[in-house]
Amino acid sequence: MASIADKLTPMEQFKLQEQIIEVKIKNEEYILAHPEIKETFDNFYRILLLEKPDDAFAFAVKFFTELKRD
């Protein structure tokens, strides 16, 4: 099955790749400027792996809902 990128011209593929890189850089800059994001997700992953819930999505909802209340 062909992807959308396969239907692009080489120039369009190049431009798309540049945009993807720019977005990744901006996202990384944002995360670096907000260390609480990494800390929050690190805590979530640690607790998730300790508890290993059957329903990871429900666990995430509960985790972040309770976090919001604190």
Image (cartoon, grey):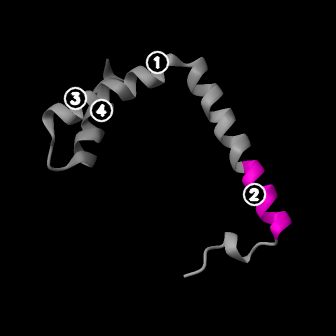
Foreground residue, 10 or 20?
10
Tag 4 or tag 1, which sits nearer the N-term?
1
| Residue at 14 percent of width and 35 percent of height | 51
Q: Is residue 12 magenta?
A: yes
Neighbor class of circle 4 (other Cα within 10 Å; few <14, some 14-19, many 20+) is some
Decide if residue 12 is on the left or right side of residue 38. Answer: right
Q: On the image, numbered disc 2 is attached to which residue?
A: 16
Q: CA distance from mark 3 to mark 2?
A: 37 Å
What is the distance, in whole Å, between disc 4 and disc 2 at their CAs? 32 Å
Residue 47 falls inside the magenta stretch = no
Percent position of residue 39, x then y: 40, 20
The residue located at (58%, 21%) in the rendering is 32
Label 1 – label 4 distance at C-alpha: 14 Å
Instruction: Estimate the x, y position of residue 36 in percent, counting from the top left.
Output: 46, 18
Please give the residue where the numbered disc 3 appears in the rendered image. 47
The answer to whether mark 4 and mark 2 are in CB contact below 8 A is no
**Dot 3 crowding, Cα within 10 Å, few <14, some 14–19, many 20+:** some
For the image, the number of numbered tags is: 4
- Labels 4 and 2: the sequence-earlier one: 2
x%, y% of residue 10? 81, 68
User: Which amino acid type is marked by label 3?
Assistant: Ile
**Amino acid, disc 1:** Glu
Circles 2 and 1: CB atoms closer than 8 Å: no
Residue placed under numbered mark 4 in the picture: 45
Using the rendered view, name the quadrant where residue 23 is placed: top right
SS under mark 4? helix
Question: Which region shows up in magenta?
Answer: 10-19
| Residue type of the residue flagged with mark 4 | Tyr
Q: CA distance from mark 3 to mark 1?
A: 16 Å
Element class at badge 3: helix
* Front in this rendered view, residue 1 or 42: 1
**According to the image, label 1 marks what residue?**
36
